[in-house]
Amino acid sequence: MSGTFTPRPGAAPLLRQVRAQTLMEARLLLRNGEQLLLAVVIPLLVLVGGVLAAERLDLDLAEGTPLEVLTPGVLALAIMSTSFTSLAIATGFERRYGVLKRLGTAPLPRSGLLTGKIGALLLVQVLQVVVVLAAATVMGWRLEVGGLGVLGAVVVAAAGTAAFASLGLLIAGTLRAEATLAAANLIYLLLMTGGAVVVPASTYGGFGAVATWLPSGALGEGLRAALLDGAFPWPAVLVLLVWAAVGTVLTARTFSWE
């Protein structure tokens, strides 16, 4: 028996599935009020509040004006917010409600699901960078570094995304949803205040040298080196890649899909 069936049954091409998953993940993230708070509102409040407080109190940040120093730090904070906290919380509750288990029965393979999540992270981060830099520009910030600095910022941001995303999935894949929510928020607050992500490690005194080995410190110091000095931050990139490798290996060995 022969014939033509329209539409032809079967799964869509993998690329189209991944693109649909990416757009759906991005829409879900942007529609969630808590995720928007982490991704956009808190970084903007830290930027505006930090600059005003530093100027009012006449704080000496050593490496430049408060706006010059805080803008790369807030970009690092925004990357950490989305790649770590938002991803961990969203994935943790997807496990709890069986979303990941049900997606496992769909034609989209698990690698495609993870690729979709990473694609959504990158889309949201582009939005974050546009919003933060627009706010900083209105306040008087100007990009004064050359191509090497811009390239360094992009590379260290990508390495930071990989490091924090692997750690976020590690927590989400091993803890219960409520524990993931608590742990992700607690770690986020600790790294934001004591992890050298917003302000330079040199302001932490003796702990500063230790903070540069944390993923938050490496991301913050790397973006400051790129956007303040125009340098390619090799040490920070290497530290972040090590964190990404460790987080990926541990996640691959421990992640539970249900």
Image (cartoon, helix red, strand yellow):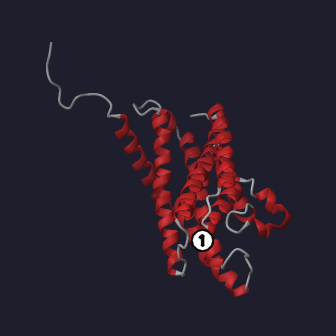
Q: Is residue 45 left or right of residue 189?
A: left
Identify the residue shown where x is 62% and y is 62%: 231
- Residue nearest the observer in this picture, 134 or 23: 134
Task: Judge left or right: residue 195 versus residue 44.
Answer: right
Q: Is residue 68 above or below residue 153?
A: below
Q: Which residue is mark 1?
A: 71
Q: Is residue 196 left or right of residue 90?
A: right
Q: In the rendered image, which quarter contains the C terminus?
A: top right
Looking at the picture, how far across and down is residue 195, in whole percent? 73, 60
Q: Residue at x 15, y 24 (%)?
A: 4
Q: Quadrant of residue 253?
A: top right
Relative image position of residue 206 (x, y in whole percent): 85, 63
Local secondary structure at mark 1: helix
Relative image position of residue 31 (x, y in whole percent): 45, 58
Q: Residue furthest right?
A: 206
**Residue 11, x across and y down, in percent:** 33, 31
